Image (cartoon, grey):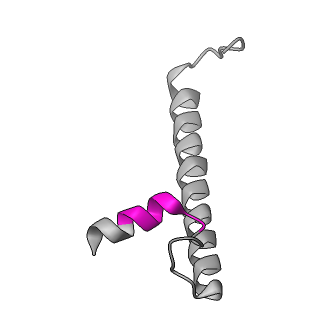
């Protein structure tokens, strides 16, 4: 926040959009990784699921 350029609005919007892209990209990568691990393990049992929040959400939906 120290180096504020002359046009503050444009670069800030670009930075926010880029941060959102990185954020959602990371979430998508983690989700895909968990699904790949879960598919390779073929174990949807309670003890061995890597993403426990996703597992609980899946149980709520079903």
- Above or below: residue 61 compared with residue 38: above
Q: Position of residue 39 (x, y in %)?
A: 58, 85
Q: Nearer the viewer, residue 50 or 23?
A: 50
- In the displayed structure, 42 sits above or below 15; it is below
Instruction: Please tell me whether residue 56 belongs to the stretch shown in magenta.
Output: yes
Q: Nearer the viewer, residue 38 or 2?
A: 38
Task: Please count the marks in the image.
Answer: 0
Residue at x 71%, y 11% (from the top left corner): 2
Direction top: furthest residue: 2
Q: Position of residue 5 (x, y in %)?
A: 65, 17
Q: Residue at x 55, y 63 (%)?
A: 51
Left or right: 4 in relation to 49: right
Q: Which residues are magenta?
A: 50-57
On-image quarter of the N terminus: top right
Viewer-nearest residue: 7 or 2: 2
Looking at the magenta stretch, what is its main secondary structure?
A: helix
Position of residue 2 relative to residue 42, above or below, is above
Say which residue appears at 65% left-offset and 14% top-offset: 4
Residue 13 rendering spot, x and y as whole percentages: 50, 33
- Furthest residue in direction front, as rendered: 47
Q: Quadrant of residue 6?
A: top right
Question: Which quarter of the image is occupied by the C terminus?
Answer: bottom left
Q: Quadrant of residue 14?
A: top right
Q: Taking 51 as reference, is 46 above or below it?
A: below
Q: Position of residue 16 (x, y in %)?
A: 53, 35
Q: Is residue 28 left or right of residue 1?
A: left
Residue 51 forms part of the magenta stretch: yes
């Amino acid at each position: 926040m120290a180096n504020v350029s002359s046009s503050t609005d444009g670069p800030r919007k670009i930075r926010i959009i880029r941060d959102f892209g990185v954020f959602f990209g990371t979430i998508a990568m983690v989700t895909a990784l968990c699904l790949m691990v879960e598919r390779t393990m073929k174990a949807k049992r309670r003890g061995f699921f890597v993403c426990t929040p996703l597992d609980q959400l899946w149980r709520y939906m079903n």
